[in-house]
């Protein structure tokens, strides 16, 4: 055997050994109670050819504008300053309307806007032909309790059991029973009922509350269901023993910071963006905006506006608790082009 052949065989054996070791690495088991964080970007919702050829046609709110933008109620105030800056610099007229994820998705379906933006990761029905998603970042969904509740920390396992109706008293939480946590959770009465409050929005979309429990059928029967964010906060603020969920920005923006507080999950504060970016806090919203990727429909200025927003995410007010895409990429989150599609 020649020297070169021997070296080649040696290197091949090293490669095979390394590859085999990598294949044997344990795969993190998926919790069956946790829903999907993202949908498959390659699965496109089928639409008739007539719809595909249909141009973008503005509604009354955008008449006379150069660009039409429809945003959900948290993205709207977060990126509106950037849109107005770009509008001024580019000497354009940009119409911007505020709505919910549902109304914004409707604007895309009707082709009434050049750009849309949601606080939920897109579901299968949202992946319309030639609609391209650009992720801005993620923000934690916090568990919320009444300010007078002495509990500050809950395990993720107990949080799931609570919303499933399997834990009905605050005194039955592992963090309360544990001697090491008694100092922080002292004062919990044995008869203090645990009352889940839920807002089961965007059921067809991955992420958000689905990362707590995968679907509505997993939630218990003894709960209070509300329809709006304001109702969620008002109910948690007034109902003793209640626990709900929402982004910290909504809690603070609607002036409930002195009536409602957040819980740590397994010791991790939902306001800690570094822990969220590292994948240590696992319940969150994904914020994305869209553009049309079709030559006869797409507007160059729409793509330029999106790039301007992506390049200036660092100036978005910190009160939105947004972890931007650059920080996610540094922590190993997975992307398909500009869209976040996988956890680290």
Image (spheres, rainbow, N blue to C red):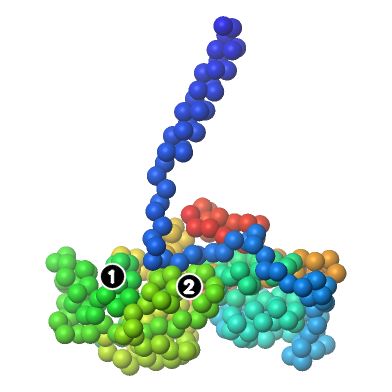
Q: Quadrant of the N terminus?
A: top right
In contact (CB < 8 Å): disc 2 and disc 1: no
Q: Tell me the element at label 2.
A: helix
Crowd band around label 1 with a 10 angstrom C-alpha radius: few (<14), some (14–19), many (20+): some
Earlier-in-chain disc, 2 versus 1 = 1
Q: Nearer the viewer, residue 175 or 249?
A: 175
Q: Tell me if 172 is positioned left or right of 327 in this view.
A: left
State which quadrant residue 283 falls in: bottom left
Q: Using the rendered image of the protein, determine whether residue 74 is visible from the camera's viewpoint.
A: yes
Q: Nearer the viewer, residue 72 or 275?
A: 72
Q: Tell me if 40 is positioned left or right of 30 in this view.
A: right
Residue at x 28% of width, y 70% of height:
158
Q: Tell me if 62 is positioned left or right of 14 in this view.
A: right
Q: Is residue 18 above or below residue 241?
A: above
Q: Nearer the viewer, residue 107 or 246?
A: 107
Q: Position of residue 95 (x, y in %)?
A: 74, 84
Q: Using the rendered image of the protein, determine whether residue 77 is visible from the camera's viewpoint.
A: no
Total numbered labels:
2
Q: CA distance from mark 2 to mark 1?
A: 18 Å
Q: Tell me the element at label 1.
A: helix
Q: Position of residue 167 (x, y in %)?
A: 25, 76
| Residue at far top of view | 1
The residue indicated by pointer 1 is 158
Crowd band around label 2 with a 10 angstrom C-alpha radius: few (<14), some (14–19), many (20+): many
Q: Position of residue 237 (x, y in %)?
A: 34, 90
State which quadrant residue 119 falls in: bottom right
Label at residue 9 = none
Residue at x 42% of width, y 38% of height:
24
| Residue at far right of view | 296
The residue indicated by pointer 2 is 208
Residue at x 64% of width, y 79% of height:
105
Q: Position of residue 298 (x, y in %)?
A: 80, 70
């Amino acid at each position: 055997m020649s020297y070169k052949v021997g070296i080649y065989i040696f290197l091949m054996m090293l490669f095979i050994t390394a590859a085999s070791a990598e294949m044997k690495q344990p795969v993190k088991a998926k919790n069956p109670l946790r829903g999907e964080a993202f949908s498959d970007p390659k699965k496109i919702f089928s639409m008739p050819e007539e719809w595909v050829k249909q141009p973008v046609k503005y509604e009354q709110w955008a008449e006379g504008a150069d660009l039409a933008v429809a945003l959900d109620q948290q993205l709207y105030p977060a990126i509106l300053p950037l849109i107005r800056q770009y509008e001024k610099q580019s000497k354009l007229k940009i119409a911007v309307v505020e709505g919910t994820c549902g109304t914004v998705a409707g604007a895309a379906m009707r082709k009434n806007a050049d750009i849309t933006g949601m606080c939920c990761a897109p579901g299968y029905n949202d992946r319309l032909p030639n609609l391209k998603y650009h992720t801005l970042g993620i923000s934690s969904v916090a568990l919320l309790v009444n300010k007078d509740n002495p509990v500050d920390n809950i395990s993720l396992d107990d949080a799931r059991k609570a919303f499933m109706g399997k834990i009905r008293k605050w005194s039955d939480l592992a963090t309360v029973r544990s001697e090491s946590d008694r100092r922080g959770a002292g004062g919990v009465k044995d008869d203090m009922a645990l009352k889940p409050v839920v807002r089961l929005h965007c059921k067809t979309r991955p992420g958000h509350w689905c990362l707590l429990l995968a679907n509505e059928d997993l939630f218990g029967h003894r709960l209070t269901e509300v329809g709006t964010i304001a109702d969620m906060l008002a109910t948690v603020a007034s109902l003793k023993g209640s626990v709900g969920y929402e982004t910290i920005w909504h809690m603070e923006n609607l002036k409930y910071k002195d009536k409602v507080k957040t819980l740590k999950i397994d010791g991790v504060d939902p306001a800690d963006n570094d822990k969220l970016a590292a994948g240590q806090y696992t319940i969150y919203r994904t914020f994305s905006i869209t553009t049309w990727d079709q030559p006869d429909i797409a507007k160059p200025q729409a793509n330029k506006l999106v790039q301007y927003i992506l390049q200036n995410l660092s100036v978005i007010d910190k009160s939105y608790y947004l972890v931007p895409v650059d920080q996610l990429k540094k922590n190993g989150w997975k992307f398909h082009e500009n869209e976040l599609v996988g956890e680290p």
